[in-house]
Amino acid sequence: MEVVLLLPRPAMSQPRVLPQSKETLLQSYNKRLKDDVKSIMDNFTEIIKTVKIEDETQVSRATQGEQDNYEMHVRAANIVRAGESLMKLVSDLKQFLILNDFPSVNEAINQRNQQLRSLQDECDKKLIALRDEISIDLYELEEEYYSSSYSLCDSNDLPLCEAYWRQEPAAFSPEGLSMPLTAATAEQSTATSQSSTPSHPHVNGHGTGPTEHS
Amino acid sequence: MATHAVANERLRALEELEREIGASLQSAGNVILELSKEKANERALERQAAQFSAAVQKVEAELSAQIRYLTQVATGQPHEGSSYSAGKDCQLALNRVDYARLKLGELARTCEQMLEP
């Protein structure tokens, strides 16, 4: 019977968990298989042999009968124990297969990755199609809105960029910017309030707006 | 799908072996039960004995084959593959879809409110 020794590994600082190499483990699986199958066959054969009734016995028939009964019980228990040991072996093999059968693990991972990527691509494709449809509808709605009379009623209904640039001089002129264009921007705000056409004042000093109005 | 089937095929074979072990013990019990009768039916006896013998031989042969395959394939190293990155990307895509659905729902509700008399 093989004895597994704990071999020290000075190059590696691993904790002592299970020192068996894979070859030793698989050899132990083989041994367990052979022993259990042998046990089942031998005990079954002996039970069948015990069934035979002998005419001449060393002890009385009752005693022989009791002995045979006990022997059959023990051998039947051995058969069941060997069967359960085989079930445990199958369970260990399943575990070993799941952890160490790299080809099937790689295939399973690849298949899962493929599945997830196809789902992701499908989601993104549908979102892009949705985006395209909504942008078409938005374009039509904007055309309808900005070509109607509602967009010209109030200066507050200007397009966003126009309203933003229009609001900036009104927001910054009371604070007194340190730029030389503050007076010009103040003049511009009064001028633009009187004019109907929108202008493009730039607070950061590009200066084309004020010079146009001055 | 074929590759996924191959991955599970060996596990299915091992499950079949478990059933086979149970069947072999069942056959052994039936043989002994038949022998315990006063007038044993020889045909049933032979049939059960043959079933028991075939089951045990099949179990031994297939388990040996599985152990031989594992001897060739196993490396003793842990497998470090993962499908986590693909799973995370897919989860983000599903989050995008849920967000789009949420926003469209809000837009639809706003439109319905505006259209109410």
Image (cartoon, rainbow, N blue to C red):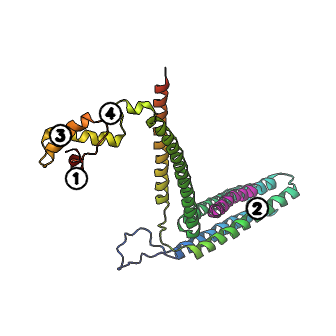
Chain under numbered label 1 = A
Question: Tags 2 and 4 in contact by the CB under 8 Å rule?
Answer: no
In magenta segment, residue B18: yes
**x and y, in percent, of residue A176 in the image:** 12, 42
Is B14 magenta? The answer is yes
Q: Where is mark 1, residue-wise?
A: A206
The amino acid type of the residue labelled 4 equals: Ser
Image quadrant containing the C terminus of chain A: top left
On what subunit does the disc labeled 3 rest? A
Sooner in the amino-acid sequence: mark 4 or mark 1? 4
User: From which residue to which does the magenta span run?
Assistant: B1-29
Query: At which x and y percent is residue A166?
Result: 27, 40
Compute the Cα span from label 4 to label 1. 24 Å
Same chain for labels 3 and 1? Say yes or no: yes
Residue at mark 2 to residue at mark 4: CA–CA distance: 96 Å
Q: Which of marks 3 and 4 is nearer the N terminus?
A: 4
